[in-house]
Amino acid sequence: MLAALRFTPGQLRGVLAVIAALILGAGITGMTAILAKSAVIEETTSQSGRLSVAALSLYQALSQADATAASSYLTAGTPSDEMNQTYRVAMRDATVALATAAGEVKTPADTALVAELNARMPVYTGLVETARTFNRLGEPVGATYQEQASTLMREEMLPKAHDLQENSLGQLNESRSDAAAFPWAAAALAAAALGTLVWAQMWLSRKTNRVFNLGLVGSTVLLVAFAGWLTMASLASASHTNRSHEDGSGPLELLAEAEITAQQARAEESLVLIARGEDQEAAERFEEHFKALTDQGRLLDRLDEAFADDAELSANIDTAREAAETWRSGHDEVVKLAQGGKYNEAVALVVGEDDTSLWASFTTLNDALTEATDVSAERFAESTNDAQRALAGAAAGLAALALGALICAAVGIQLRVAEYYA
Amino acid sequence: MIRHQIRLAAAAAACLVLAACSQPADMGPPEVDVPTPLPSGIDFSPEIDTAPVDESCEPLASYNPGSTTAAQALAQLDSQDQISIGVSQSTNLMGYIDPATNTPAGFDIDIATAVAQAILGPDANIRWVPMTSGEREDAVNGDRVDMVVRTMTMNCKRWSNVEFSAEYFHAGQRLLVPRDSGITGLADLAEDHRVCTGNGSTSVRTIADQSAAQAVTVPDFNDCLVLLQQGTVDAITSDDTILAGMAAQDPTLEVVGEAFSQEPYGIAFQKGNTDLARFVNKALADLIADGTWQTAYDKWLKGPLGVAGAPPSPQYRD
């Protein structure tokens, strides 16, 4: 085997083997890098069945359920059909999201979070139903059950859902930066293959006094094309992936946070009245949530900033802000009424069915944010589609180029080898 | 032979690669604590107050009504056409929002209404201001309300911050337990019994001094009822009026034992506002005399407390 290298045909075959190995390596690593990018983009685009999506909708559905359960307690056991429906839909969304998340978790920490949330779900609904029953019977202890349900939600369930969401977003960002990474291994192998090809041609022209070996020239051209395509596809998809994060998933997370904050403020507002004005902490928590939503530089301002150049989304945020202002002044009125002993009127203002009630302003705010979420999700899907388009055909194309380069090199060298036996 | 070994190695390598790719990290079922719903702020080992009790005064002695008039009392109100009264809206039977009507109701509310009508006439405009027990003293002194009628025990410590009317109800601390618990009083409480009470209440000390049980405190004593129904605590201690309000909501519970404390309820006023206190004492004497007190007692407390009940006789210091 080694003896063969002393003869030129053997040397030629050795050179071919090195070139072939390098081209094959570049082709395979390039193709896998591109396929992995595609897979990550697929994962970030897909709106169903993914952990981050499930965790977020779980978090939202839980806080929506709690806001509605607390509100409907105030209706003295006779909530409107709309409220009943909202609660049921929220509980369904939460349980479906939890089941989906259970199938998607990949770390022991996330598995534990899902299990802990699952274990608390029936405890929460049990407390809510007990509260409803006592409320219907006219027993004031129902209020305490409702408070306990909200405490369980606020102090245990929502933080766990939030942790799950944070973990999943962390994992997503990790794979996102993997996807944006430049495929250095493939690029290095391609460069090495090119270098070897050039050297081989110089060596051959010295040995054979022929300037060009058409096979090797062809192989070089194909490899240059390979390297160019690899670079362009990687850079383009990286910029699209980053843009989709900035324009799409970033604002999406912000919108979800705003929605959840509004829902928690709503739950606290109801708790103040459920505690008959004797829960100062709930009143303080309401203020905190509301400030997080509307204060300068907080959630609504940040959303405005994120959507500054998008008329449709800006309009939604304007609607949300208007509703928040109406809600705010209505809430101050409620506090005044409750403090002044006009409990009935305060309750009517909070959960009444007419357009001036706080339920109406909260719903308007919530709906505006939901609509913005839908639009923003569409934008996100568009930009990830662009990213995928940049990669479309790249894997197959790169494979074909690498294969072409390999065949050309083999033919070019084989022809020289054949000359020795001619 | 060599070729065979190579194949074997290759097969082994392939197995390794496949195994690494297809088998997820080892994840057995996670261990999850049994979720027990608890109110926020619950304390399973509250500190026991050991400061000596202030007994430097005669807590029942209020101001003699004398010849104070309604006009003099009216002049003391923050507003001339309405009276603001601090109450509880969450103490069943005493001061609570009737869930059926969403209006304030209870024994304290009836007494407060009668007093307000004595000052402002039968169409008295009353502003009910809900508050926690911790807010009561600041509320009268900070002009948030004209008076507080909220299961407020008269004692020397409080006398130094507010003025009190004469006693309008005599309560005492007892125990609320499940009917089948076998507990009939403080003496039956064992070391493994948990007794729930409101935080900041004097009951924590009573439980520590007079029984073997462990006190558990919560910010709102209504949480105690839920904890008792859920089996997290074995008994509740509080004023018998408050316990009666809990027993009325659950037929499997009963108030047991002798009262182990004296809780005379008084109406509180701003410190120094003795004119209002004097006139209210007159109003209280009147409503005891004309049967209003007994009617209110019969309506709210007679059944749940199981005793006929008699109005306290007023004591004055001058």
Image (cartoon, rainbow, N blue to C red):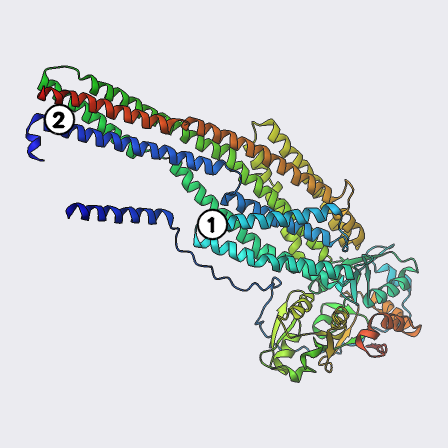
Q: What residue appears at the point 22 percent right and 49 percent down from the top-left corner? A: B8
Location of residue A394 with respect to A213 vertically, above or below: below
Q: Which is more toward the observer, A148 or A7?
A: A7
Amino acid residing under circle 2: Leu
Earlier sequence position, callout 1 versus callout 2: 2
Q: Given the image, what chain letter belongs to the residue carrying mark 1?
A: A
**Dot 1: few (<14), some (14–19), or many (≥20) neighbours within 10 Å?**
many
Asked if residue B72 can be seen in this view, the reply is: yes
Q: Position of residue A7 (x, y in %)?
A: 6, 28
Chain containing mark 2:
A
Q: State which quarter of the image contains the N terminus of chain A.
A: top left
**Label 2, residues with CA under 10 Å away: few <14, some 14-19, many ≥20:** some
A104 relative to B186, above or below: above
Tags 1 and 2 on a common chain = yes
Kindly identify which residue carries mark 2: A12
Where residue A127 sits, quadrant-wise, is: bottom right
Q: SS of the residue at dot 2?
A: helix
Compared across the picture, whether A161 is left or right of B241 comes to left
Displayed quadrant of residue A148:
bottom right
Q: Nearer the viewer, mark 1 or mark 2?
A: 2
Q: What's the residue at 61%, 47% (across, down)?
A: A93
Name the residue furthest bottom: B187
Identify the residue under disc 1. Answer: A105
Q: Quadrant of residue A133?
A: bottom right
Q: Secondary structure at mark 1?
A: loop
Residue B85 in picture, x, y percent from top left: 80, 60
